[in-house]
Image: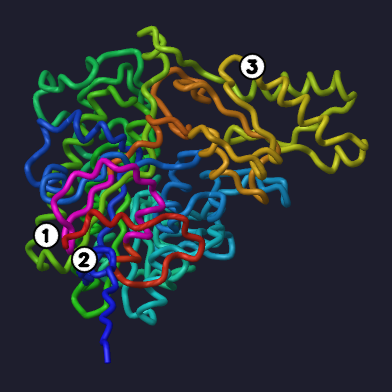
Amino acid sequence: MRIVLLFILLPLTTICQITKPKLIVGIVVDQMRYDYLNRFWNKYSENGFKKLVNEGANCTNTHYNYMPTFTGPGHASIFTGTTPINHGIIANNWYDKSNKISTYCVEDTLFHTIGSTSSNGKMSPQQLLTSTITDELKLATNNKGKVIGISIKDRGAILFVGYKADAAYWFDGSNVGQWITSSYYSHSLPNWLVELNKTNPAEQYLTKPWNTLFPINQYTESLPDSNSYEGLFIGEEAPVFPHDLPSLRINNHNYSLIKTTPFGNTILKDLALAVLREESLGKDEHTDFLSVSFSSTDYIGHQYGPKSIEVEDTYLRLDLEIAELLNYIEGNYQKEEVLIFLTADHGAVDVPQYLIDNNIPSGYFDAKKMSLELNTHLIKQFQTDSLIANVSNSQIFLNHVLIEKNKLDVKVLGTAISNFLIQQKGVKKVFTAAELTITSFSDTASSNIQRGFHHKRSGDIAYLLHPGWIERAKHTGTTHGSPYNYDTHVPLLWFGAGIKSNTINDFVVIPDIASTIAKILDIQQPKSFTGKPILNIFQH
């Protein structure tokens, strides 16, 4: 009798033992371009960004693979493992075609504020059309694994942790200055957060000026402090250091002022430490998840632009906040017990006026002016007013009730609008909803627009501006939202449990993050995932 031995050769990645952590900490830095890692490298401490890079896995070629690159879609895409075509968060705000009003991505009037008397807690994840990786963690552990999301921004806290989170907390500014939540998550704040709020966490940072961390002449990676590309706080005569926060808070919405300073990141770090300590995260056999979204970087970037000393100072200070968070984690957990990842929700373009002054093609697109001129054009061609219901997020929504009433051909109307748009200065391409639904695109920008297009929620026509162009009236500060490299290329750093020190230059997309976490935890992928695990970050 002959015995035949069969050897099945399995890929190394299928037999590799992946450490399942007791705690995952996901950090998102709002509006962090990848080049900020390198640009400020020499001034970073050894224990913040440098520690994550030097001792962890650095995915150097990580990109968002859709448009628009905004905060809401960014946070949703990180945790759902897919893009707006599936998860439905097509922008921060969008035009609701059914109710004919603008809707906010997490607004929900069915719920009320917990922690203050304002309306800023009337929020929920109900606009999200699929599950998040944290939802899957809750399902896999029969709700025994804790999930908590925190951010200055409500959408930064909520869209991270989805439907089944134990808690989501965000900052209520103006005259409140407290951490709040929604009745969607809880009927009361935990006692430890009530006590934290009693300390008035933002107050101490608004009683002294914002000056630079280092002598200002050392900020050689930025433009001079006094330049024409930076915005002003109300009451300031020039956008220069020191920024007199005690006097500025009066005319800049009081506690909301802290959002546009590095100290918004400080109070969020303090909250993160409190959550870890008071909620005993990572202290039992069920994996817990804390998501931390630093928002002040975005507010500061919008106001001052990427080349400002304010942005540089903010990142140098954020580096120290991250170092403190890492130090606490290393002092209270074993390294193999905690997985940390850090990424961003989008990047940002250099201030277009700065680019123009340096002979780089760029510009400002006036969408309101275009909308008025388009309406006039359509009246002449179709003898009908108000055929456009809304223009927002580089999309045009048609008034289908009026179109049907006047028996107009939608295709003919769409062609007329496309022909008008493509003649506008700054417009590179125009797409109809039909094209975005059925066409297969070969170029990256068009494919990104397609992955950001949701058939039920998006408009009838989408347009793409040339690189360097933005929809912004004022010529100071910057924004984001495009499918171009400066908006899509962001950091992705992995550190801790099962992660090997490595530099990974392979192309990675943001939806891969949730798939990687599902692989690590050996749980179901989010329901609409399109990403794939980044296997070469693991130890073998």
Where on the picture, by quarter, is residue 233? top left
Residue positioned 30% across, 17% down in the render? 238
Vertical side of 466 occupied by 403: above or below = below
Of the two numbered discs 1 and 3 in the rendering, the one whose residue sits closer to the viewer: 3
Q: Is disc 3 placed on a helix, strand or loop?
A: loop
Q: Residues within 10 Å of mark 2 (few under 14, many from 20)?
A: many
Where on the picture, by quarter, is residue 485? top left
Q: Is residue 236 left or right of residue 76?
A: left
2 and 1 marks in contact (CB < 8 Å): yes
Q: Is residue 227 left or right of residue 21?
A: right
Residue carrying label 1:
328
Q: Which of the pair 503/295 is nearer the observer?
A: 503
For the residues labelled 2 and 3, the Cα–Cα distance comes to 52 Å
Query: Which quadrant: the C terminus?
Result: bottom left
Tell me the magenta residue range: 492-516
Residue carrying label 2:
276
Vertical side of 250 occupied by 5: above or below = below
